[in-house]
């Protein structure tokens, strides 16, 4: 049964006594706009999936992606708190059944600084099935003057962040060559990282999965990005009826085997380095964390399965943050990298990325370089025929059509589209895409992430003890 738009049902039954027909939120237009945005992003992700399947064909991946996007759900368990880390563990019909973890966009906590009370307020959201609307609640997270050193540190950080937001946004805009109002960054509600806006982490989950598949690393579980509907299941017949469409944007990540990295395993791989049984996948995660500027790879976001001797990287939403203007024309990272694998492999100078992964990374790099060189060649030829300099924008379509006939640059163009969806602005996407290729080239030069303390690329890295004291 197809869902009937909320406004139409209200108009037909404005005084209804049962069900969602009687619900018309006071902020209906804002809610309608929110759900339209969910639908647009879901459609864009579906198009990206189709394009990905054509450029990087893999029948097995395509089969599992179809299940993650539209599979019939046969079981559901809540494993996270609504409005904090709202995650459900779901099983979808298949042979064998596929298990995945589903995160709603509303499930991300936001934080704001309240000057009147000198407090940090935590903002939670969750979908209420009884009222059929998104509910927002607030509570004090940390209070200034409490005497607790941790609370004082949190409050001070958010106070400074709030008071200096205009300057921060200007520095970001300067780096990308934009006006401050073109930078999509909320100045009143923050995530725990400066350069990642609330509501954008699910797209980064999706990006991380695609990067993993582009490079054939196999360390990030397959992840879909789709719209969630509110569905009623008849307890007697099991028949499902869609009540409202596009209520949430969700990431659906295939379950990975293993358990969170514990202190004992951490110490083992720290001591053994490339000799550890799981060293191959651990190094792959470290390289991916470097490439996508991971900001949250603590021990809970690394799984290890002793049976397969494989590490997996989950929860990739806090990555690929914005940059700001640094020294000269080089970026100053807003957030220091947080990555246990990256911090570990940098302690072993002889630890290299495996040949298979290196070959895959190099193939992408070489295809990208050939594509960019071909664009430059076509631009020069066109300008020569015209007898005067022409902008890339003016002849860009002609160049793209020529390259498309030559079937070149598909991989890099897909990466650019992926970044465009993630960052929401053409200039930001282009700049970040080129910075990504620079990091890729640095990695290929030595077969391992560079010592990021020596250069500007990738920013600083926090020591393990900052975010995992028990293992330090």
Image (tube, helix red, strand yellow):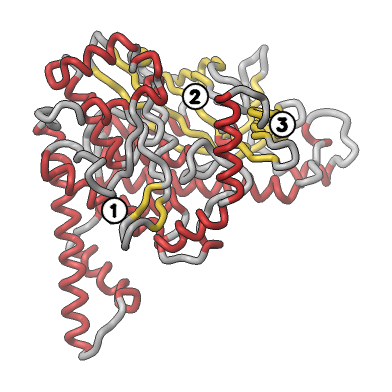
- The residues tagged by marks 3 and 2 sit, at their Cα atoms, a distance apart of 32 Å
Q: Nearer the viewer, residue 100 or 431?
A: 431
Residue topped by disc 3: 137
**Residue 361 in which image quadrant:** top left
Q: Earlier in the sequence, mark 1 or mark 2?
A: 2
Q: CA distance from mark 1 to mark 2?
A: 40 Å
Measured as percent of width and height from the top left, residue 66 is found at: 40, 33
Q: Position of residue 310 (x, y in %)?
A: 24, 18
The reply to whether residue 241 is in sight is: no
| Residue found at x 68% / y 48% | 32
Q: Is residue 435 left or right of residue 372?
A: right
Label 3 CA crowd tier, 10 Å (few <14, some 14–19, many 20+): few
Q: Residue at x 46, y 38 (%)?
A: 225
Instruction: Kindly report the distance in space between the C-alpha atoms of the residues bearing marks 3 and 1.
Output: 39 Å
Q: State the residue position of label 2.
A: 72
* Position of residue 470 in the picture relative to residue 377 (left or right): right
Q: Residue furthest bottom?
A: 387
- Pair 3/2: label in front: 3
Quick check: 189 left or right of 9?
Answer: left
Q: Nearer the viewer, residue 283 or 325?
A: 325
Which residue is tagged 1? 435
Q: Earlier in the sequence, mark 3 or mark 1?
A: 3
Mark 2 Cα within 10 Å, few/some/many (few <14, many 20+)? few
Whether residues under marks 3 and 2 lie with C-beta atoms below 8 angstroms apart, the answer is: no
Q: Position of residue 392 (x, y in %)?
A: 30, 74
In the image, 27 versus 168, the foreground residue is: 168
Quarter of the image with the N terminus is top right
Instruction: Give the foreground label among 1 and 2.
Output: 1
């Amino acid at each position: 049964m197809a869902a009937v738009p909320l406004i139409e049902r209200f108009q037909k039954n404005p005084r209804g006594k049962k069900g969602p027909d009687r619900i018309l939120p006071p902020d209906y237009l804002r809610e309608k706009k929110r759900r339209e945005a969910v639908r647009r992003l879901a459609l864009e992700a579906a198009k990206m999936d189709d394009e990905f399947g054509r450029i990087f064909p893999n029948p097995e991946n395509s089969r599992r992606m179809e299940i993650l996007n539209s599979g019939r759900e046969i079981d559901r368990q809540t494993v996270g708190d609504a409005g904090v880390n709202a995650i459900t563990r779901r099983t979808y019909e298949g042979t064998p059944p596929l298990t995945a973890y589903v995160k709603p966009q509303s499930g991300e906590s936001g934080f704001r600084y309240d000057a009147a009370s000198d407090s940090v307020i935590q903002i939670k959201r969750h979908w209420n099935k009884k009222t059929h609307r998104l509910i927002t609640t607030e509570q004090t997270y940390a209070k200034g003057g409490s005497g607790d050193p941790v609370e004082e540190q949190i409050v001070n950080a958010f106070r400074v962040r709030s008071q200096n937001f205009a300057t921060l946004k200007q520095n970001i805009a300067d780096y990308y060559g934009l006006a401050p109002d073109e930078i999509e960054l909320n100045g009143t509600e923050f995530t725990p990282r400066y350069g990642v806006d609330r509501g954008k982490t699910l797209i980064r989950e999706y990006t991380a999965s695609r990067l993993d598949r582009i490079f054939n690393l196999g360390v990030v579980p397959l992840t879909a990005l789709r719209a969630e509907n509110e569905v009623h299941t008849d307890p007697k017949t099991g028949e499902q009826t869609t009540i409202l469409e596009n209520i949430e944007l969700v990431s659906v990540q295939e379950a990975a085997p293993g358990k969170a990295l514990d202190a004992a395993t951490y110490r083992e791989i720290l001591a053994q380095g490339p000799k550890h049984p799981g060293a191959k996948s651990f190094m792959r995660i470290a390289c991916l964390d470097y490439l996508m500027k991971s900001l949250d790879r603590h021990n809970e976001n690394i799984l290890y399965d002793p049976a397969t001797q494989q590490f997996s990287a989950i929860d990739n939403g806090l990555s690929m943050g914005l940059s700001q203007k640094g020294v000269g024309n080089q970026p100053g990272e807003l957030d220091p990298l947080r990555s246990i694998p990256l911090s570990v492999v940098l302690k072993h100078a002889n630890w290299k990325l495996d040949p298979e992964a290196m070959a895959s990374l190099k193939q992408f790099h070489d295809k990208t370089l050939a594509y960019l060189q071909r664009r430059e060649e076509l631009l020069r030829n066109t300008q020569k025929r015209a007898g005067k300099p022409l902008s890339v924008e003016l002849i860009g379509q002609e160049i793209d059509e020529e390259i498309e006939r030559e079937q070149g640059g598909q991989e890099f163009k897909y990466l650019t589209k992926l970044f465009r969806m993630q960052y929401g602005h053409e200039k930001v996407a282009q700049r970040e895409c080129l910075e990504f290729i620079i990091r890729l080239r640095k990695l290929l030069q030595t077969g391992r992430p560079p010592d990021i303390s020596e250069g500007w690329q990738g920013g600083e890295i926090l020591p393990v003890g900052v975010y995992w004291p028990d293992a330090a």
